[in-house]
Structures are given as structure tokens and as C-alpha cells.
Image (cartoon, grey):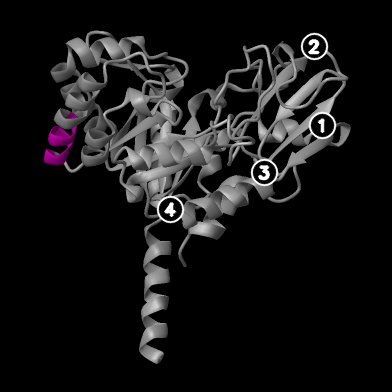
Amino acid sequence: MWCSVVFLVLISITIGATKNIVCYYDSRAANYVSATFPKNISSTSCTHYVYDGVGVTAQGDIRILSNYDTASGFDEFQNIRRTKNVKLYVLLSSDRDGGKNLTNAIAGRSEKLVNSVAIFLEQYNFDGVEIDRRNIDFDKSALARFVNRLRSRLYMINKQLSVSVSAQFADAYDITSLSLYADMINLHAYNFTTNTANTVANLAPLFSSTPNNVISVNSTVTSWLAAGARRNKVNLVVATFGRTYVLASEDQRAVGARSTGPGEAGFNTKRPGLIARYEFCNMAGEYNSASDSVTATTYYFKGKSWIGIETEDTLVQKFTYVLDSSLGGVAIFTLDLDDTSNACGNGAYRVSDLAYQYFGSE
């Protein structure tokens, strides 16, 4: 009996120690009026940090997206490593850069891009690169070949490789190849619809609301696993931000109600249709809320304003799902859109703190 207990405890410790907590930092946050810098996120307890601030050219060269990155951003980001044992990645391509240049470089200049990535990682002392393929404007065979070549090159210089993918487009990827060659697959399981659509939608339903509405975190994770993705390489990405809409009628506000477009931009991020967690908490008291236990979601409404955002309860349910599904871990997108200043009253960077409570090891 005693041996069995010890065995179970060792299993528990091993599982906890190997779970990933991948945390993204978007360098745009350094230019907000209330800025967030890499030094501000160093108090978080993530296993991997991903710096979003690098794009590519169609010819396969690395393109820095802001003067801040090379002036101080990269150096400040490296300081995180000096305070803890973590891996530092850079995201190749981003929302700011779009995906067309990366698509063209992978298709036509893959060898040049492989070398450019390797040189960049060594020059700026990153531990790895994450290839951002959250759109589907690419040839999946070309992507698979590129990931294979890049994996071989990075192995020679002891660097790691991760891939960002969109959860709902499983057919767009050669999942077997990605699972074989990437160290991590970060599954962005949110934004199943865009807020440019004419209806409001939950940000990230954990389960489907009806048999005919099959798009959910569970359905997409299940599809990826069934297609050959290795559980221990898949990290479920959760969003710290909320999606905002303008209702066509304040009397019709249930999920699926008609919308006239994205909601007003946040006071600090200035991005229509998106609101940071700290921006929402500063006005949450003015809103009513509605929760759905089937989909494990909550939305907020006031007049014609409609916001879908994760609560602590919905996050905990997703973290439990990761444990129950034996996935590799979670990813937080992004730290700078989390509650950076304790505006919600539960502590700064609450999403990553919750993740550490579930997946961190002492």
C-alpha cells in the first residue's frame, strides 16, 4: 500500500512538473499610454515566454516590427531569464505583420528563411522560435516541409521550435508532421467567429451548446487529437482579452443576436472589438451578466454594448479540461492584456497566476 501511494505521488509530481505555461508578450504594449514592459511581466510564473514583435519579408529575411524591440525590448525580455529558469521564444509573424509574407517565404524562400531564423535566434539569444500559422492562407505541405527543415537546422544550434495554430481549421494543417517536428503546438482555441460578423458570439465555448453547433474548445481539441496531434505537445491557448460588439437592438442580446459590428476600442489599447482585462474591470460594475453552464461561458451587456470574456470560473474549467485531457499545458495570450495592475482586485496577472496554481510545481 505504501509503495502504491508513493508511486501515485511521484506520478502527480512528474505530471505537474512537465505541464507548460506559455505566456505571450506583445511589444505593442510598450507604446500604450499605460505601458507594459517585459520587466513588468517578470513576476509571473510561466515556463515559456513568447515575444511578439518580429515579422518576415517575402524574400525570407527577418523584419523587426518596432524600433522599441531592438532598442530595449529584446534586452529587457532577456532579463526574465536571469530571474528564473525559463525558455524564451520569439513569435515569427504576428497580427501586426499579417501572414502573406510568411506564406510566400515558406513557399519560395524556405532555405533562406531557415537560415535567417537560426541567425536571429543566436544573435538575440532566444531559446526558440514560434511559427505563427493562425490563418489558413498557406499550403500545408509547404509548411510541413519548412517545419521539418527548420527543426533540423535548430537542432544543430540547440534551439527549440513551436507552432501557433488556429484550433478550428484542423484540415488546413499536416498535423502528423507538426506533431513530429515541433516541440510545442499552441492551439488558439478562441475567436471561432470574428466580431466583424453580423452576430455576437461567445469568445471560447468549452463545449457545444447544441448537437448542430459543434464549434467549441472540446470539439476542436478532439479533432486535433484524432488527426494525430500528440497530447503532450498540445497547449491550450486561452485569451486574456474580451471581444466586444455593438448590438443591433438592446432587447436582443442572447448569443447569436444581431450585431452591427465591433464594439468601442479600449481606453488604453485603442483596438476596436477588443478589450483588455484591466480595461473591462474598470467598467464591469456598469454591466449585467449572463452565464451558460453548458458552454461554460459568460457574457456582459449594457445597452447595445456586448462583451464576451473569460471569468475565473470559465478559466478554471478550461484548466481542468487540460488536466483531464492530459494535454501538454496551457498558453496565455497575452500577458499585457491580462489584469496588469490589479484593476479586478484579485492580484495582477491573474490568468497566469491561476494557471500556475493548476500546473505549476513547487
Give the crowd class for mark 4: few <14, some 14-19, many >=20 residues within 10 Å.
Answer: few
Task: Assess whether mark 4 and mark 3 are in contact (beta carbons under 8 angstroms).
Answer: no
Q: Which badge, 1 or 3, comes first in the chain's sequence? A: 1
Report the residue marked by disc 2.
248
How far apart are labels 2 and 1 at the CA level? 21 Å
In the rendered image, residue 318, in percent from the top left (x then y), is placed at 56, 47
Magenta region, residue range: 150-156
The Cα atoms of the two marked residues, 2 and 4, are separated by: 50 Å
Q: Mark 4 is on which residue type? A: Thr
Residue pictured at 66% horizontal, 15% vertical: 272
Front residue of 227/301: it is 227
As shown in the figure, which amino acid type bears the numbered disc 1?
Met
Going from the N terminus, do you reach mark 2 or mark 4 first?
4
**x and y percentages locating residue 161 in the rendered image:** 27, 37
- What residue would you read off at disc 3? 294
Residue pointed to by mark 1: 283
Amino acid carrying mark 2 in the image: Ala
Q: From this viewpoint, is residue 76 visible?
A: no
Work out whether 262 lies above or below 41: above
